[in-house]
Amino acid sequence: MLRLEIAARENWQQMAKDYGFLFHTMYGEPYWDETAYYQFTLEQIERDLEAPTEEIHQMCLHIVDQVANNDELLRKFAIPEAYWDAVLTSWQQKEPSLYSRLDFVYDGKSPAKLLENNADTPTSLYESGFWQWLWLENNVDKRVLSTRADQFNSLQEKLVNQFKVIANYYQISYMHFACCKDTAEDRGTVQYLQDCAKEAGLTTYFVYIEDIGLGANGEFTDLQDNVISHCFKLYPWEFMQRDEFGPYAISSNTAWVEPIWKTILSNKALLPSLWESFKGHPNLLPAFFESDKHLLDLPEHSNSKWVKKPLYSREGANIEVFSKTSTDLSSDGPYGEEGFIYQAFTPLPKYNNNYTLIGSWLVNDQAAGISVREDASPITQDMSRYLPHIIL
Amino acid sequence: METNQANQKRSRFIDLAKMRKSFALKPLAVGVAGIMLSACSGSREEAIVFTNLDECTDTFPDMQAKCEIAYQQALEEAARTAPKYNTASDCEHEFGANQCRQYSSGGGSFFMPLMAGYMIGNMMSPRPYYQPMFTSYSRSSPYRYRWTTADGMDIGDISKRNHRVRSGAFEKKPAVTRTISRGGFGSSVRAKSNWGSSRSKGWGG
């Protein structure tokens, strides 16, 4: 695993415009950064990332199965009781999932360690599935990179296939797509998924989350009063469940992607649950529920630093890093009212003064590629930069 | 885009033309018509519009069953997908006097246009396509004397029976209902984004 510098493609900003990649620069700072790339060996990809990603996903599904059937655990996961039946039904009916992203600490040598599972509303999908793919094609065509260079990135191919699976499961020929207003990044991500769905033969309709209406018979509607029968939503389940329309998300019989059983996986309570069930697994970090905080004082953890994370949080908000003697780092944010978990702290590897985080994608249950993000801070937040990668 | 590895780890092929969101080369003169033309080009197929069941069975005496099935299913589709209005006058404003009927369902009653005809495609196949047709007699409507689908696709003049339609014309449409309220999603986002000075980006992770 190397970080190598490379010249940016001369015309990349114009290409970004042509392809509708409108969020490569945010708040005046570069988000997409092609002045460097990461190089992995095939072994690093297959042994250290691809295989663990699929294995961890299966372990996660094991946890979903435990939690969906257990009131005590559902309460521990802070899932509102009104949704318990829906979670269980959705899981029992195996409602199809589209995608997830596992975030790993990985330095090219030691086993990748799972930081969290973005199973409900992962973004940076377009940059991963399409834009870094195009970057590689362009640089190989110009012989800037070796013709043997490859990339761990079959995302787009797999997304199109999974949309076919979903269309077949629900026997549908059209589908709605939704995200919140005022975010170019989310709209771009959803547009990309619409493109993939179209490639799979589906007609797509778009509606903003805030514009969704309630119809005369309790169904959801778009701005044209079309009934939303099947909907991809880039809006977290934990928010939906706490919104005014939350109860209708179930009673309307709308089929959602991601399905509601994913609310178990996108929850940080997953991390201590995984540790309880698979303690010592090489790709897991020790993690504990708040109620088990005394376990942090066990002798085996005496040298550990810990990260305190809210059950529900996004983009590195409300994180605190501490050891027995001090608080090292903390980040502000609006999360935490539902409780916290503790996870052993493992520093992100540093390349050229940047902290590097690996996102490993799943489409349904297949590993589908990686994304690499760099941040100046050891807690990756939403101002991190996205860098492409190759396999050579 | 050539591939030379058997175990390639990346997508084999992405149709770049389909991924483009704007034209690569700007034409000298861009008219709306030009764009519409390219957006609408693509295969077309023959379709026949009948205003009632008899017209169909008279035309195809040997295919009575197909005519009946298509008619019944078009009626069901019409109820499901036609635009819905709160009042008769709203509906008649769009479709003309006496062109609307009241419709009751669990959540109350509303008004929608009558099915004015039904369109059949691929009549010779075992399963023809069908689509309910609407038209307007209202001076204020762009659909006046035009055959249109439930979602407003203009099929052609109502005085003509045979039409060449583009291949999306028979696609199944979403159901349409009357919306009672909006804005019940998104409050959690607003609550979180009130925090701090620089709410940024989206809500994905």
Image: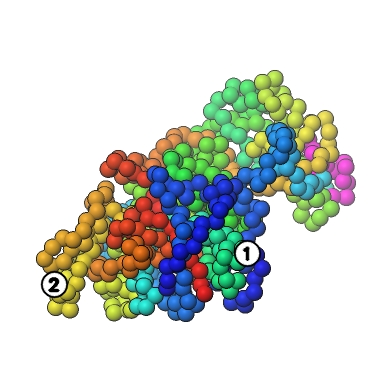
User: Quick one: label 1 or label 2, which is nearer the N terminus?
Assistant: 1
Q: Residue at x 36, y 52 (%)?
A: A383
**Residue for point 26% across, 64% down:** A72
Q: Which mark is residue B25?
A: none
**Pointer 1 residue:** A141
Q: From what the image shows, is residue A379 above or below residue A226?
A: below
Say above or below: A297 vs A209: below
Q: Is residue A343 visible?
A: yes
Discs 1, 2: same chain = yes
- Label 1 Cα neighbours within 10 Å, binned few <14 / some 14-19 / many ≥20: some
Using the numbered discs, state the Cα–Cα distance from disc 1 to disc 2 in whole angstroms: 56 Å
Residue A100, image x and y in percent?
44, 62
Amino acid on which the number 1 mark rests in the picture: Asp
> At which x and y percent is residue A196?
58, 56
Residue B36 visible to an observer of this rendering: no
Dividing the picture into quadrants, the one containing residue B194 is top left
Q: Is residue B58 magenta?
A: yes
Q: Residue at x 40, y 66 (%)?
A: A358
